[in-house]
Image (spheres, coloured by chain):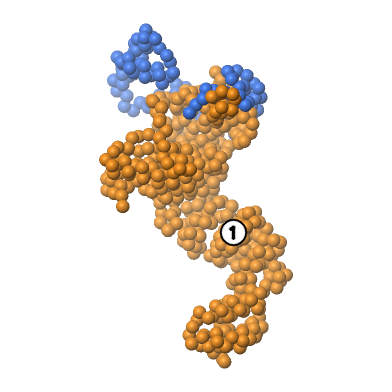
Chain colours: A blue, B orange
Amino acid sequence: MIDENTVRHVARLARLRLGSDEEKVMQQELSGILEHIDAIRAMDLDGVPPTTHVIAVENVLRPDVPRPSLPREEALREADDVVDESFGVPRMD
Amino acid sequence: MSAFEPVIGVEIHVQLSTQTKMFCGCELSFGDPPNTHTCPVCLAHPGVLPVVNEEAVRRALMIGLALGCEIAPRSIFHRKNYFYPDLPKAYQVSQFDIPICGRGEFVALREDGSELRVGITRAHLEEDAAKLTHLGGRRAGAEESVVDFNRGGTPLVEIVTEPDLRSAADAGTFLRQLRQTLLFLGVSDCSMEEGSMRADANVSIRPVGSHEFGTKTELKNMNSFRFLERGIEAEIARQTEILEAGGRVSQETVHYEPETGHITSLRSKEESHDYRYFPEPDLVPVVPDPAWVDELSAGLPELPLALRRRMVGDMGLSAEDALVLTESPELVAYFMEAAALADPKACANWIRGELRAQLREAGTEPWESKVTPAHVAGLVDLLEAGTVSVPAAKEVLAGMIETGDQPAEVVEARGLGAMDASELAAIVADLVAANPDQAQQLRDGKDKVLGFFVGQAMKRTGGRADPQSVQALVREAVADT
């Protein structure tokens, strides 16, 4: 079982604000996932390559040929704030 | 004086000069109006899928091959997760434990001719972030930043070295020559000022003789090699001071301020280094066909190190000649063309010396000038044949720069040909007769006075006389009288 501090740390990294009830639920669920991983770890996996992709497809590549970009008004249409033809965001230092 | 030695490794980000971005067909641009090269993929709209740019893979492989890296038979992309407004997906697609290019080695040449070997840890593909600009108070009361996504998604290759460097000067030498190599490959513009090449340095110090590493700091965002060298120097000094005072260096990101020479700490944000990498499920593995890799390897241009070795080993050039002449692919091509036609050492001297000096005043480069490599070779041949003197050859060069005429034509048009022996002998005899004191000094063994006669002869002949011939003739004339 992972502790509450670990849950809070992971939530902070994911920019999630959890209530204390939610923290408890996440603690249960995340622990369940890790237990599953531990169960896999306990197996003899010598010679089994790690699975990074579940479909056996390789080398999907695209030729280096330009395609039209969005008109700027279109690109900026959903922006919360438009400043200087750009996406306005809170000040970052 | 200090009992510490620096241990330095560098990370270099290189923007690939492809037509389009890493994962979408938006055109790469520099200096275009903001947000005019975006699409749902590079703006991270929901439901879009990235597709890898084949040309970016090709260039990453070329870089790996040029750095002697092991090419991964299969490599995958990872998500590097963090939140920042210049990263619309809240993750950067990068590579983690299976980069496309693994271990390699880069050999640089120091000015003293010694070799500087730097281990390459890896070179991997990733995408660049967008451009974030802080507005400050430009809008009344506004404290905000703006994002231009034109740059977002530009293909990058990140090259990471082993901590093999032991001085700021070596770090500079390595980076400059790595940049040259990348320019020769034609994979990137490698402009530090425009940000298409960026370098960070990891710096630590340890007692001389120790094999353990000290705590390192990361020196970020240097936009010139000189500042990077100075920044490393300043950081080494700062760490030395801390350790000598019995303190501890803390692991952090630091910034060098060129204006003041100070190192400042960029308080790294809490937990900012927990990127929670995991395999990117939207991109399938890249498995380069070995035949393709072989073809790329065979097609690599001759790189600066090989060129320098050939110039020094086979062509009789000095290490310094070779370093200067391999500054750019254009200069190498120019020199090689001349050296195929006339004595390579003499061509090297004239190209890196007088030609570049005269052209610098005009603000142009040899390959852009009216003087072709064949012109240079022709001039070298005229000198060797004794048709022109060295001072006259400089005049011929100036003439060629101006008109683009053949060297022999300039010699003819400007009357710069070496004088025939009897004409010169007559002038020298005159000079000796007119300057009996100096002639006597020469008889007394004061060879310094030869310079006087050479100077006088040059004046009288408008620089056409060959100084060596003048010296010989003066000695003869003095002995005769």
Quarter occupied by residue A88: top right
| Other-residue count near label 1 (Cα within 10 Å), few / some / many at <14 / 14–19 / ≥20 | some
Q: Residue at x 28, y 38 (%)?
A: B247
Quadrant (top left, top right, bottom left, bottom right) of the C terminus of chain B: bottom right
Q: Residue at x 28, y 44 (%)?
A: B244
Q: Is residue B472 above or below residue B89?
A: below
* Residue B246 image point, x, y percent: 27, 40
Q: Is residue B67 left or right of residue B147?
A: left
* Residue B459 image point, x, y percent: 64, 76
* Residue B22 image point, x, y percent: 55, 31
Q: Is residue B359 above or below residue B390?
A: above
Q: Furthest residue to the bottom? A: B481
Quarter occupied by residue B18: top right
Q: Chain of mark 1?
A: B
Q: Nearer the viewer, residue B281 or B80?
A: B80
Q: Is residue B448 above or below residue B257?
A: below
Amino acid type shown at disc 1: Arg
Q: Residue at x 54, y 28 (%)?
A: B136
Q: How many marks?
A: 1
* Residue B239 image point, x, y percent: 34, 42
Q: Is residue B112 above or below residue B412?
A: above
Q: Furthest residue to the top? A: A21
Q: Which residue is mark 1?
A: B356
Q: Look at the image and tell me whether residue B222 can be seen.
A: yes
SS for tag 1?
helix
Q: Nearer the viewer, residue B422 or B108?
A: B422
Q: Furthest residue to the right? A: B413
